[in-house]
Amino acid sequence: MQHNVLILDFGSQYTQLIARRVRELNIFCEIFPYNHIPSDLSSYKAVILGGSPFSVRGEDAPHPDLSQIRGKMPLLAVCYGAQYLAHFSGGEVAASNTREYGRANLSYIKEGETFFEGVSENSQVWMSHSDSIKGLPTNAVKLASTHDVEYAAYKIEGETTYAIQYHPEVYHSTDGKKMLENFLVKIAEVPQNFTPNAFVDEMVAELKEKLGNDKVVLGLSGGVDSTVAAVLLNKAIGQNLYCIFVNNGLLRKNEFQNVLDQYKGMGLNVKGVDAGDRFLGELAGISDPETKRKTIGRVFIEVFDDESHLLEDVKWLAQGTIYPDVIESVSVKGPSATIKSHHNVGGLPDYMKLKIVEPLRMLFKDEVRRVGATLGIDPELLGRHPFPGPGLSIRILGDITPEKVQILQDVDAVFIDGLKSWGLYDKVWQAGAILLPVNSVGVMGDERTYEKVVALRAVESTDGMTADWVHLPYDFLMKVSNDIINKVKGVNRVVYDISSKPPATIEWE
């Protein structure tokens, strides 16, 4: 994989967003903690210093070793990075009189600067800092100001070093992507060659070389990540890939058979294992959400291990791990080489003795979908909403019984089918129903009922890190509520969850 751009992480909530914006320019990039910079930088064409919740004036300020970077390769310092260069290179950083958060507009742009080509004065940018640069570092030249921030951007003469106090990566910085493009493409001359087609060609070649004639086993979930990983591996090693799709009894209604049917036309070597009774038996009487997750993870490994032993000479376990999983496993405060396991595997025990292969570990979710489209995977499958690894177990609050699973599967089917028939499914990032541990009084005909309450949840998001509830049409909600109560025995009340993340999470458990 071509490295091209290195992003140093100082703990900012926006670091992943910088990477996403760079990738949107068809430029490959990687994120590393500031204190674990790769020893070999020869393949990188540029470096970006990210923001940070820390102050450069604090005793705990992160100190990157820039000796092999600054002045030797193009460098863009964002927010904390810009203040760091100023504070430790002859400039001055002080606490702001007013906290500088939110929208601001550029009031001055130095003429003839490539960094600001195509960017007009008054362009909106997004500030997020309580310190401010009061004096520029040695050999620096001011490039831009806002009404409140004199040194919103600067460059250091004699180096290809640029610094900005705002965040170009966020949506509210109107020309932020243009500035990143100007720096990376026009100034640093980084090639824009990271495309889905290029990724597929390079990854298939890499997998062929790495795996040779070895056998690989993959736990399919029916979701986007594991499916794209399977098709990529199949393209590289064909029938040496053995896919196992486990029914844990907590899938959506008819999902086990529907997904198996979908895979049949894709040329994959798939075995379906119906272990629903085993999972539900192990979950009986368990109400604690974390215990549910651990139980499902343990039983999955046991079932998966049983099936793996039926195959001879398997040497590799393939996982659908994607880049956010990799990033989240490496903390700025305590970097770790441990990579987060795919949720359907839940942590690989030593006794399985399999090597790991993760063909998607450098891709974001939207990139996985684009690669899937390049591979010719059905758009309906690529457009599937995310579904939690523990399945409906964390959408049934309290203990789990076969009867509760049946009720929730029926409710969920009415809701999801309704979204599709009303043309709303693709406008929602994730949707599902939650069975509450609450009974309510109702009336059907002339009879009193005392039955279950279900909550419907639909959110819009790009990556699941933040999410807003979707304003579904009242007519739709009225229709789906009526259908659920009339068609699903045991439910007499439907509510709609209008919480956003944060403070709430997408799932209830």
Image: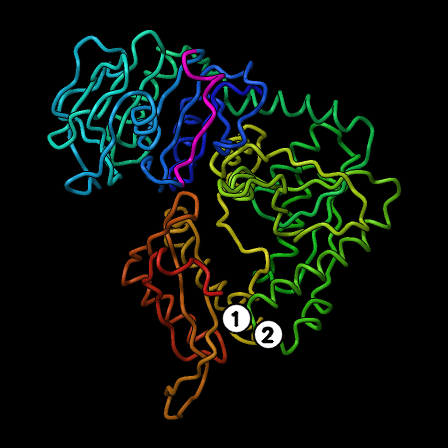
Task: Give the camera-side residue of 195 and 116.
Answer: 116
Give the magenta part as a residue range: 60-71
Q: Amino acid at mark 1?
A: Ile
Name above or below for residue 495 compared with residue 214: below
Residue 327, image x and y in percent? Answer: 52, 39
At 31% from the left edge and 68% from the top edge, which residue is drawn?
Answer: 478
Q: Quadrant of residue 477?
A: bottom left
* Residue 247 is inside the magenta segment: no
The dominant secondary structure in magenta is loop
Give yes or no for contact between labels 2 and 1 (Cβ–Cβ under 8 Å): yes
Residue 9 shown left or right of residue 164 in the figure: right
* Residue wearing tag 1: 396
Residue 40 shown left or right of residue 299 in the figure: left
Residue 104, image x and y in percent? Answer: 17, 34
How crowded pointer 1 is (Cα within 10 Å; few <14, some 14-19, many 20+) is rated as many
Q: SS class of the residue under badge 1? A: loop
Residue 167 shown left or right of residue 236 in the figure: left
Residue 457, image x and y in percent? Answer: 40, 61
Q: Quadrant of residue 446?
A: bottom left
Q: SS class of the residue under badge 2? A: loop
* Residue wearing tag 2: 400
